[in-house]
Amino acid sequence: MFSRFLKKFSGQSTQKDEAKKRLHFALVYDKLEINDSTLKELQSDIVGVISKYFEIDQESIHLEIQRDEDTSALVFNTPIINVKRSRA
């Protein structure tokens, strides 16, 4: 019990804890796995929404999912050519 207490405060983790982290990451990764057709549909939807407000370079769009141990992020990158002004 005392050794677990020391490990907790010293930053060391047990093999069991590391295995749990790896399993958790694998499950999250599997859950968020997106096929290419879904990613293309998502990109099309995002382009539609962004195009309401900005003129964008549709030839330079880059959409990807980045993952690390704890999080996943949807990264959408495109050059903005111009801001569309409202007509109100």
Image (cartoon, grey):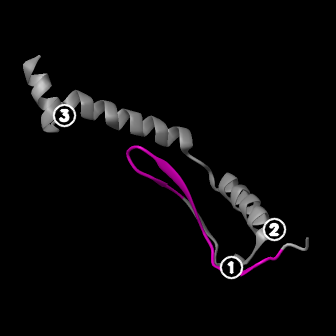
Q: Main secondary structure of the magenta part?
A: strand
Quick check: 30 left or right of 35? left
Q: Distance between the residues labelled 1 and 3?
A: 47 Å
Marks 3 and 2: in contact by CB < 8 Å?
no
Please say if 38 is above or below 60: above
The quarter of the image holding the N terminus is top left
Which amino acid type is shown beneath numbered disc 3?
Answer: Ser
* Residue 52 disc label: 2
Asked if residue 36 is among those painted magenta in the image, a careful observer would answer: no
Quick check: 40 left or right of 76? right
Which amino acid type is shown beneath numbered disc 1?
Answer: Glu
**Total marks drawn?**
3
* Residue 59 disc label: 1
Quarter of the view holding residue 84: bottom right
Residue for point 40% across, 39% down: 25
Query: Observer-nearest residue: 37 or 31?
Result: 31
Residue for point 76% across, 58% down: 45
Q: Distance between the residues labelled 2 and 3?
A: 49 Å
* Residue 13 disc label: 3
User: Where is residue 81 shown, x and y percent of the image?
Assistant: 70, 83
* Range drawn in magenta: 65-85
Q: How crowded is mark 3: few (under 14 residues within 10 Å), some or many (20 or more)?
A: few
What SS does tag 3 mark? Answer: loop
Which amino acid type is shown beneath numbered disc 2?
Answer: Lys
Looking at the image, tell me whether mark 2 or mark 3 is earlier in sequence order.
3
